[in-house]
Amino acid sequence: VYSPTKKLWFKTLHGSAFRAPDMTILHAQNSPMEENPDLKPEKIATTEALVGYHFTKKISGSISGFYINADDLIQVSEFKYVNIGKMESRGVEAELKARFGKNTHAYMNATWQDVKDKTHAKIAGTDQYQGDFHPGSVPEFLMNIGLNHGITENIIGHVSLNYAGERDRSEEMIWDFGRMELVRRDIREPVAERWLLNASLTLKSFPVKGMMLQISGFNLLDDDHRDPDTVGFILNDIPRPGITYMGRITYSF
């Protein structure tokens, strides 16, 4: 992190992680998939560069670019789990924050991302290989807008609006033996965009000191939103809950 002035700052970061294969993959018994105890962990590396600026004492913003590279992803090839998968993602994030008091602040952030499968696996039934393709189920654009407002010192309200853009289907190609040509594996319409309105009310020291009561509502617009079915067995994808309410009580001794 480098800040040449009190208002301007730069940040770069790099991180890496791994995920070890679980036992059901290493020793797949009673399964059509052949076990592979020699599987290696999946690996991922992330690089990000950010520039931020304090426009005033209460308003700040930032914009960043990121690149994510995943290797040795575990996928199925010829009825066997192998480390062949490779994914890349790049994009831009922007954020704006504003403070209006002790317990009142607003924020807005947006993300644009481009995801590609770069495995270049062989297409079954042919001597051809996949090119770079969008794996599907990933929105190109995301956005969050929120307001946290201290109604009183002990009563805090929060409202947020979450947007996820249209999610295309996988562009993976397969060989159609009936038509004797390459076709897209999933030709369904994209998953529709969604807007989720959430809100909460927090009461501190209520009804006694040390106790906190929080009431939250999710998807208050009752948007018909769905998680993508990546396999293709569910025609209209996986429905998610409509309007949902939740209460929480905590006490600090």
Image: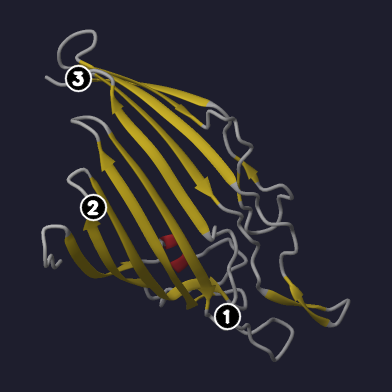
Most extreme residue toward the bottom, as rendered?
127
Q: How far separated are the C-alphas under marks 3 and 1?
A: 54 Å
Nearer the camera: disc 2 or disc 3: 2
The relative height of residue 30 versus residue 56 in the rendered view (above or below) is below
Which quadrant of the figure has residue 149? top left
Helix, strand or loop at label 3? It is loop
- Residue type beneath disc 1: Asp
| Residue on which the image places disc 3 | 153
Mark 3 neighbour density, 10 Å: few (under 14) some (14–19) many (20 or more): few
Question: CB atoms at circles 1 and 2 under 8 Å apart?
Answer: no
Quarter of the rendering occupied by the C terminus: top left
Mark closer to the chain start, 3 or 1:
1
| Residue on which the image places disc 1 | 132
Q: Position of residue 51 (x, y in %)?
A: 26, 65
The relative height of residue 59 versus residue 30 in the rendered view (above or below) is above
Q: Nearer the viewer, residue 91 or 170?
A: 91
- Residue type beneath disc 3: Glu
Q: In this orientation, does residue 27 appear? A: no
Q: Is residue 22 left or right of residue 163?
A: left
Mark 2 neighbour density, 10 Å: few (under 14) some (14–19) many (20 or more): few
- Residue type beneath disc 2: Phe
Mark closer to the chain start, 2 or 3:
2
Q: Nearer the viewer, residue 11 or 130?
A: 11
Which quadrant of the figure has residue 68? bottom left
Mark closer to the chain start, 1 or 2:
2
Q: How far separated are the C-alphas under marks 2 and 3?
A: 27 Å
| Residue on which the image places disc 2 | 55
Residue under the point 51% across and 46% down: 163
